[in-house]
Amino acid sequence: MQLPVLDHNTTADKVFGTASTLAQSISESADAGRDMLGAPFQITVFVIAIVYLLFIVRYWDFLRFFIINAAGFHQPNRDKAHISPAEQKNIEVVMIILGVVLSALCVVKVCCVAYPEILGKIGGSEAVWILGGVVTGALGVTIALQYGFTLLVSAICERGDIGRGLISSKLIYLAVGFVTIIPFGILFLLSPTIPAKVGFYGMGVCMLTALILFVKETFLFFVSQKISILHWILYLCALEIFPLSLLLAPILR
């Protein structure tokens, strides 16, 4: 069989047929994804960083107190005496909002760089913000449902004190967890390849550590209230693991 003689003007159609198409390289696809993260995306990250720094400077003693105590090294309560319950609640809410928005931006960047075809299916220059809004909404709804179901179950069981205690513990651990995660998230969002990897893995380590500490705290709380370990396991499965699995299902599918 004689092979066709190719010259410099030979096209893909002549070699592979008219139905052939040129595949887009991975690097070209990733570059196209990065191009979608424009100035508004970076401005949003800078706003998060500025608000985060303001709260860190203003309430560092309070945040340090809870971080050290969460790690198992108990500090005297005088370190948080200057913080009123209303201020504590405001700190928790602000840090959780910053953490949720930053988590959504991290998901957007991962999709833009690693899976730009996802944004291509959404279409339009607003695809980045549509995806970010969906992720933010999903995280917000999940937190709200966990809050509501915890109060509902505790009210049905006529143990409102346990429900309020679980919610208080969850909010403070969630806020403190975001306090440690946000710096790595900002590094991941604004840095080139190698520092971004450091930020990504740093977020993973902080998330895992915060999760372990929270599980330990809930276990000790159930033990202190003389509640069966079976109920603790049911609580984790129903209100912690199940919502998390719903969020991860579309990603792992």
Image (tube, grey):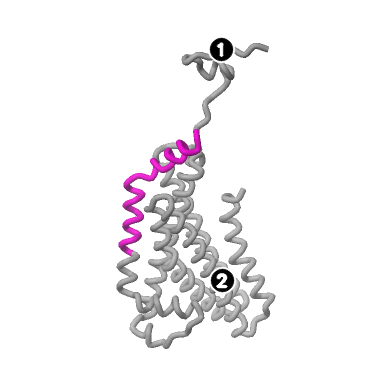
Tell me the chief SS of the magenta region.
helix
Q: In the figure, residue 76 lies in which quadrant?
A: bottom left
Closest to the observer, 173 or 149: 173
Residue type at mark 2: give it: Ile
- Identify whether 180 is placed above or below 162: above
- Earlier residue among tags 2 and 1: 1
Other-residue count near label 1 (Cα within 10 Å), few / some / many at <14 / 14–19 / ≥20: few
Q: Which mark is residue 212?
A: 2
> How much space separates mark 2 and mark 1, taking CA atoms?
66 Å
Which of label 2 and label 1 is nearer to you?
1
Residue occupied by mark 1:
5
Above or below 46: residue 162: below
Q: Are marks 2 and 1 in contact (CB under 8 Å)?
A: no
The residue located at (32%, 56%) in the rendering is 46
**Magenta run includes residue 48:** yes
Provide residue 63's location: percent of width, then percent of height: 39, 75
User: Which image quarter: residue 126?
Assistant: top left
Q: Secondary structure at mark 1?
A: loop
Horizontal arrangement in the rendering, residue 91 relative to residue 228 (left or right): left
User: Percent position (x, y) of residue 202?
Assistant: 47, 62
Stretch in magenta: 25-51
Q: Which sits in the foreground, 194 or 213? A: 194
> What secondary structure is marked by label 2?
helix
Residue drawn at x 48%, y 46% is: 111
Image quadrant containing the N terminus: top right
